Image (cartoon, rainbow, N blue to C red):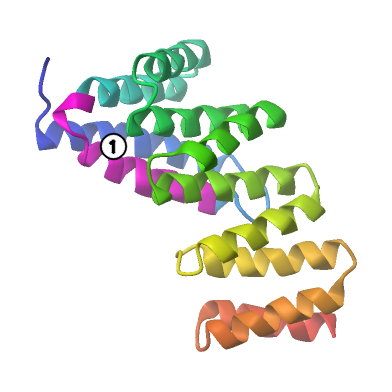
Amino acid sequence: MKMHSISDRKSIGGIISGFVVKQAKGNKTKFFAVVAFALTIIFIGIFILRLHAFEEASSAKLAAAYASFMHGDKKSGTALIDEMIAKFPKTSAAYHARLIKADFLTEILEYDEALKILTEIVNNGKSDAIKSLAHARIIYIYDSKKDYLNAALVSKEFIAKYPDHFLTRDIYLNLAEYYILSGSKDEAAEVFNEVLVNFPATRAAESARNRFNQIK
């Protein structure tokens, strides 16, 4: 099995990051778009750099898949992702591959298929890092579908499960927006107050205060 040096692995991460940035620039969807793609850069990059020798082959396939997608060859990219999932089904790499596949299904508006994959990751993923990413993407899909009831329900689940996650502040703010969009301004006000209590002297608190004043 061919071994990759640290610089090789960083090059792989660079390929992935470059593709994700390109995708982020082309997606203007509200709430979660920028956060979701930024998360991909952070966690996929960390993941690639920390792969064990056992998973070197799968890291190469991930990079090859991203390169294919970056050059517009979605068919080859999808085939490589599916091959890796089939070959390394229970590995961390496979769950990252599933996350990637769910992202591209979401991009082409195949939300139900993406939700199936993301739910599997949430239930069976190898770490809380990958599970939380999948959980956040489920919220994003419900947001995209304008299903604000389910977006709110999954947001509350995320907050309860990951109270210290760096995304939690944004999840709180988005939860309040879902309540506003659903006509529940009183519940939105409660969420904004929770942000003020739990995250004082932060940008999230400032945003919550401004939005609260707007809806009074």
Of residues 159 and 8, the one nearer the viewer is 159
Residue 172 versus residue 13 in the image, above or below: below
Which residue corresponds to mark 1? Answer: 14
The verdict on residue 43 being magenta is yes
- 193 vs 214, left or right, is left
Residue at screen point 47% across, 46% down:
131
Quadrant for the C terminus in the image: bottom right
Residue at screen point 36% across, 46% down:
43
The amino acid sitting under disc 1 is Gly
- 13 vs 139, left or right, is left
Q: Which residues are magenta?
A: 35-55
Q: Main secondary structure of the magenta part?
A: helix
Q: Position of residue 176 (x, y in %)?
A: 73, 69
Q: Position of residue 147 (x, y in %)?
A: 80, 48
Quadrant for the N terminus in the image: top left
Residue 168 versus residue 49 in the image, above or below: below
Residue at screen point 73% across, 58% down:
152
Residue at screen point 45% across, 69% down:
164
- 116 vs 12, left or right, is right
Q: Position of residue 170 (x, y in %)?
A: 58, 66
